[in-house]
Amino acid sequence: MSHSSPTPTLERPRPASARPATQPVNHWRQQLGSTLLGRFAAKGRLPADDSGHFPLSEPRHRWPVLRSLSRSPAALIGFSVLLLIVIVALSASYLYPGDPLDMAGAPLLTPGEDWQFPLGTDALGRDLAAGLAHGARVSLMVGVTAALVSVLIGTLVGALAGYFGGRVDRVLGWLIELFQTTPSFLLVVVVVSITQSTIGIIAVVIGLTSWDTVARLVRAEFRALLNADFVLAARTVGYSTRWIIFREVLPNALPPIIITASVIVASAILTESSLSFLGVGDPNKISWGSMIGTGRDMLRSALYLTAIPGIALVTTVFCLNLVGDALISALNPRLRGRAS
Amino acid sequence: MNAAAPFNQPGQALLRVRGLKVSYGDFEAVKGVSFDVAPGETLALVGESGCGKSTTAMAIMRLLGGRALISGEVGFDGRNLAQISDQDMRDLRGNDISMVFQDPMTSLNPVLAIGEQISEVLRRHRGLSRIEARAEALKLLKRVRIPNAEARLDDFPHNLSGGQRQRVMIAIAVACNPRLLIADEPTTALDVTVQAHILQLLKELSQEYAMGLLLITHDLGVVGQWADRVAVMYDGRIVEEGSTEDIFTAAQHPYTQGLLGASLRLDSDSHYARVSLPEINVQRGANGQIRFDLDSHARTVTARDADASAQPILELRHLSTAYKTRQGTVTAVRDVSLRIATGETLGLVGESGCGKSTLSKTILGLVKASAGQVLLNGVDIAGLDERRLRSHRPFVQMVFQDPYGSLNPKHSVYRILDGVLKTHGEKSAQARSERIFDIIHRVGLPPSAVWKYPHEFSGGQRQRVGVARALILRPSLVILDEAVSSLDVSVRAQILNLLADLKQEFGLSYLFISHDLSVVKYMADRVLVMHDGQIVEEGGHDLWQNARHDYTRKLIGSVPVPRYAPADEESVPYANPAWQTVPLAVLLSRIAI
């Protein structure tokens, strides 16, 4: 940009339609170029200067967030590993048909001892690799469902409390405090023992007990952002409450939400494992948590029983964090341009 | 520059800066600055934001972080401050050289009583006992004229007003009789009536103790009233240096001339209807050479006589706004009545906390009025809920003060403007797009600006986007709430010119709210003075000469006015001899258009 813009002259500006929409001479070349080079040619398709022709739609790139993510090595690694885990989870029944809880071979084979069971077997002779694959399903399902439920409820409650303030804030504040002060694990145990302990219910209940963190964060962000001039400007223009909450304020409050969500995924997976350990989990499903729980007894003699599902859990959470971090920079226009 | 200034014999200089450079990695913030400060002299370092004036001061004090690379010579008392050890520098700081910062709100420790904070310096540097230090602190508080100093000694910073806090800061700074005081924008955060007292105090202290004063400021009014000599900085260099009189009456450098022309003076009679403000065009050559051009155009606005019989666009009748706080109800706006006619610019002046921002928020319905009427085109909108207010919104829009905070950082300019049109029922995407490009063109931005995000613009450009957002709905009234207050002088001139041009083009009315009297004088057809939530005086352009209310007089009397005026009082471009030094460049740029 030039450092000092010209004073506007009082001539009538040409309407946009009067300008040539495209430069006809270069048209086919541009098309060919962008077809051949695809996204790599994005820079070349920028309007050459500010005079004359300019596009009616955003010229630089249609998916700035995806583009930015694709340029961040951290996000790429995180995504590919997560994708791998998801593929393994989805194809678990093909890779390891049959019930992973069935006895498959000799008990306590260490990894590599028998190549039929590359990750070994546990005290009951169950295949660890099969358990890992089938467990990924349950653990990912629990983690993602719980995070979704808590982020949805938490964001909504926090946004309403923060935006409206006053009486609404007070009532919702009490609700948040109620959930904060209740030991959430106990609540999950109570609810699960009253209802059926299927994995779906467990996931939702974990989500229902962990939204208070999100709500508190969102409320604080909203309180701070409401006094920002751009929100006042939005109200001056006459935007609806819904528009202001979801289009003006929420995008600016996203970073802490994303970080918290990835933490909730991890803690939900662990909560589920604690439930399995206490015996109130779903007894018919194997999960990483329950594998860690059963392996815990032989921590000194057979470390790999806890270590392998543990590593899977840590890797998943770590990759979620990588993706979350990259997502935050990708969503911030100021950081988007930089290589991260 | 001016290594051997005639009025400064080398032996006399207290501070002698030669070829000072500061760089951060590849970026050179200060590119070889040289100047002298003599004992008892006030040197003003003037420039716009980012010119390196504060960095220069911090480099002299060695307060820059580890990443800054400092070279050159900072001679003080026969020693080169750039070379001495950290321990020696610490002893020097606060003792022989001290500094006053811009923001008195954050530079005092909020959990320590002010007497304690002053004593601390005395005990550290002068080795006084606790009791002696307290007695000395009391003397200092009296010296900086804090009323009822005995009782104030045990007060905490939050008990004091902004001006009093700055006085405490000055008391701490002069506690050890320093020989050099560096004041970095000491009055920028303060009201104009307070500013005059603080500067008066600094000047007195400087003369009493034969203390050199390095005054860093962007305000040419302050410079013209208080400085002995002036150094004008641009882009890390001093472009011109001289006595205040020389700079103000016969500036040589086009940048200085532009700054002087662009900064409005309360004692000059320029008005938007007759003359536009000169704009500085800076061109950077391929070899790094910088060329300055001055650009100005005459403007003729047929003065509209406010037709009393016609319906005003906006009329306030006995409007009051009260806030509920923990301490009880605070009435920020009290029984305010005013009218704004079509095509009129109504100026509203007042100091911070007088209720002028609450007033603008009440008009826009962002805050509910507690009593009275807001008649917009004859319809009372004061009691309307948000849904019914929406149909009235397009008629009144607002431009906000802070161009950094008033645009959503997550949206491109296109999206910001598109949302406004969508909300107000423009269904066709093609029509919306045309209107967006049209308004962007009219506020003087290139078409490609619509795809940019707020952080990609400079402050002035952002404010143009803010103006575009306000105007895209074709309002009849625009509220400008301190809309140019946070901008640099030269950028402010551009935005004021833009506003004046757009007003004529669209037939707009403005409610121009500012604490800066000279800007209001330039922009307004009629002026209201607000104090403590009430309108205390109303007047036309003659108000500035014939103020009746005491508060208005006090306000006008506090505005810093340079002691020297350019040879031609009425600043008409081209007729002013000062402008004739660059007629060729201006002429060429005219022909090129």
Image (cartoon, coloured by chain):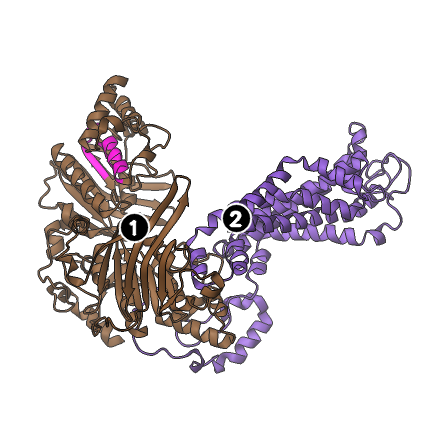
Q: Position of residue A223 (x, y in %)?
A: 49, 47
Q: Which residue is mark 1?
A: B533
Task: Check residue A21 for magenta coloring.
Answer: no
SS state under label 2: helix
Q: What is the display colour for chain B?
A: brown
x, y percent for residue A57: 51, 71
Q: Which residues are magenta?
A: B163-182
- Which residue was labeled with disc 2? A162
Question: Chain A in the picture: what colour?
Answer: purple
Q: Nearer the viewer, residue B127 or B432?
A: B432
Task: Tell me which chain the residue with mark 2 is part of.
Answer: A
Q: Is residue B203 visible?
A: yes
Instruction: Identify the image quadrant of residue B547.
Output: bottom left
Give the residue displayed 54% in from the left and 80% down from the top: A28
What subunit carries mark 1?
B
Same-subunit check for callouts 2 and 1: no
Q: Which residue occupies the foreground of this view, B238 or A131?
A: A131
